[in-house]
Amino acid sequence: MSVIRAFIAIDLPAEIRQHLSRVSHKLQQQLQPYPVRWVPPQNIHLTLKFLGDVSEHNLQVLTRLLAGEVASHRPFEFGVGTLGAFPDLRRPRVIWVGIEAPDELHALQRGIDHAMAKLGYAGERRPFQPHLTLGRISRNATGAEVRDISHVLQKTTVGFLGSTRVTEVHLYRSDLHPRGAVYTRLFSTRLNPEAPPAVV
């Protein structure tokens, strides 16, 4: 039985990707000596649910459940801006740009999480914090390197980068290669303008 790695995400328009690319390039120049794995601009997206291993045999059921859930939500907009890190800027491990998330985004993510739980995919334990990952700091980074990276991040200001209207949700396949992950879109489904307002 063939198994793939998969995730559910929202794509970004080219204009916002360009802004994110400039932010990432600036940070890469400042953090060049440090062990950070940067996400290529074409791979930056808003993840709603990381599924992990998915049997290709289950894809039809999965996409049907996903389409049904997404159709119960209406299109919405979100803004992009501000620089952050997980777990925080003083101890950075993941560098990201934030999302100004409306109630509709949280409702959509929660609905998808519940729908996927019906297929046995574990629900998210941590609260959903929408973000766009720019880079990940190596686990081999020394304490001094992490402090230096933190210092650069705390001095860097990222303002409002733009907003986008969300009308579709996508299922992606992720293939890991020596040069990084390659994402392939497997399925897309549209939000429903006639759906009732989000309930949070």
Image (cartoon, helix red, strand yellow):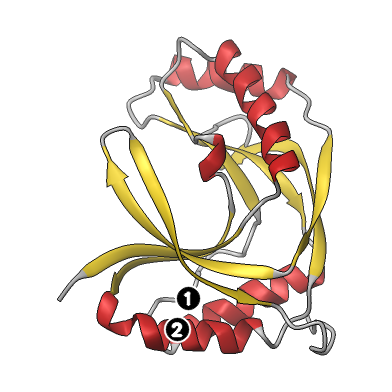
- Identify the image quadrant of residue 34: top left
Q: Is residue 119 visible?
A: no
Q: Secondary structure at mark 2?
A: helix
Q: In this view, which residue lies farthest toward the left? A: 1
Residue 108: where, in percent of width, then height? 67, 75
Q: Label 2: few (<14), some or many (≥20) within 10 Å?
A: few
Residue 49: where, in percent of width, then height? 51, 67
The quadrant of the rendering that contains the C terminus is bottom right
Q: Which residue is mark 1?
A: 123
Which sits in the foreground, 143 or 65? 65
Q: Which residue is at a point 65% across and 23% down the rendered structure image?
A: 153
Mark 2 and mark 1 lie on one chain; the one further toward the N terminus is 2
Q: Is residue 42 left or right of residue 156?
A: left
Q: Which residue is mark 2?
A: 117
Residue 104: where, in percent of width, then height? 78, 73
The quadrant of the rendering that contains the N terminus is bottom left
- Residue type indicated by callout 2: Ala
Q: Secondary structure at mark 1?
A: loop
Which sits in the foreground, 151 or 28? 28
Q: Label 1: few (<14), some or many (≥20) within 10 Å?
A: some
Q: Which residue is at a point 80% across and 84% down the rendered structure image?
A: 199
